Image: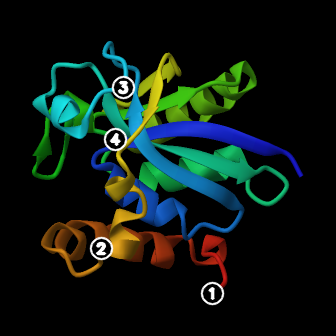
């Protein structure tokens, strides 16, 4: 078993967290903030949009059970990588689309899968592709937010449809209950 890590930004971290924690081969998902200029930012600071951080999930996965390519293919399906600094009604630089690697060996796969996604989206991809420069975990109440609050309005209206899309589109990747 070889545990790998990739950090993904695709709008609100609650959505990505909810999908990847149901993904076969993923060993851990943690919501947080990445690639900004402020140390240990709070949710409120990040929401102002002036710290440079993206809302992200750090995905740890067993590459013997799921590949980085598969992780990224799921990523490009469950969010809109063609809207700059926005996912639906979530607007601001903290909601940008981004892939941040800490292992230099991941860059080639990130760029290859992203080029394929860009072609599929007719050259409209705006996903930021960068090495991870900073990572801060989000507050405890953000971790597993959808699992803990499935009936909350945003979760029911925004997160649940993304989870269902994942479950339909990647049926073979859904973790057995």
Q: Earlier in the sequence, mark 4 or mark 2?
A: 4
Looking at the image, residue 81 lies above or below residue 115: below
Q: Quadrant of residue 9?
A: top left
* Tag 1 near tag 3, CB within 8 Å: no
Q: Tell me, for residue 40, which label it has, or none.
A: 3
Sequence-wise, which precedes: disc 2 or disc 1?
A: 2
Task: Write down the residue under mark 1.
Answer: 177
- Sort mark 3 into few (<14), some (14-19) or many (20+) by Cα contacts within 10 Å: some
For mark 2, what is the residue? 161
Return the disc, 2 or 3, that comes first in the chain's sequence: 3
Q: Which residue is mark 4?
A: 81
Compared across the picture, whether 95 is left or right of 33 comes to left
Q: Nearer the viewer, residue 104 or 36?
A: 36
Between tags 2 and 1, which lies in front?
Answer: 1
Q: Is 25 positioned to the left or the right of 155 in the image?
A: right
Residue at figure coordinates x 42%, y 63% from the top left: 144
Are the residues tagged 1 and 4 within 8 Å (C-beta)?
no
Q: Are marks 2 and 3 in contact (CB under 8 Å)?
A: no
Q: Name the image quarter holding the C terminus.
A: bottom right
What whole-number distance in Å separates the C-alpha atoms at marks 2 and 1? 19 Å
Height in image: 104 above or below 139?
Answer: above
- Of pointers 1 and 4, the one earlier in the residue sequence: 4
Regarding residue 84, the answer to whether it shows in the image is no
First reached walking from the N terminus: tag 1 or tag 3: 3
SS at mark 2?
helix
At 47% from the left and 20% from the top, the residue drawn is 134
Residue beneath the point at 29% across and 78% down = 150
Image side of residue 153 versus residue 98, left or right: left
Determine the secondary structure under disc 1.
loop
């Amino acid at each position: 078993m070889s545990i790998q890590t990739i950090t993904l930004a695709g709008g609100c971290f609650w959505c990505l967290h909810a999908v990847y924690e149901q993904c076969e081969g993923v060993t851990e998902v943690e919501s947080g903030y990445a690639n900004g200029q402020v140390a240990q930012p709070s949710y409120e600071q990040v929401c102002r949009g002036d710290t440079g951080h993206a809302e992200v999930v750090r995905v740890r996965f067993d590459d013997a059970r799921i590949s980085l390519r598969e992780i990224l293919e799921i990523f490009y399906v469950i969010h809109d990588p063609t809207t700059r600094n926005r996912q639906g009604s979530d607007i601001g630089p903290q909601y940008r689309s981004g892939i941040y690697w800490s292992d230099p060996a991941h860059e080639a796969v990130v760029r290859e899968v992203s080029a394929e996604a860009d072609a599929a989206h007719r050259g409209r991809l705006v996903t930021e592709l960068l090495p991870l420069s900073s990572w801060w975990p989000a507050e405890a109440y953000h971790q597993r937010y959808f699992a803990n609050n499935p009936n909350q309005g945003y979760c029911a209206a925004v997160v649940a449809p993304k989870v269902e899309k994942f479950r339909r589109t990647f049926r073979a990747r859904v973790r057995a209950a």
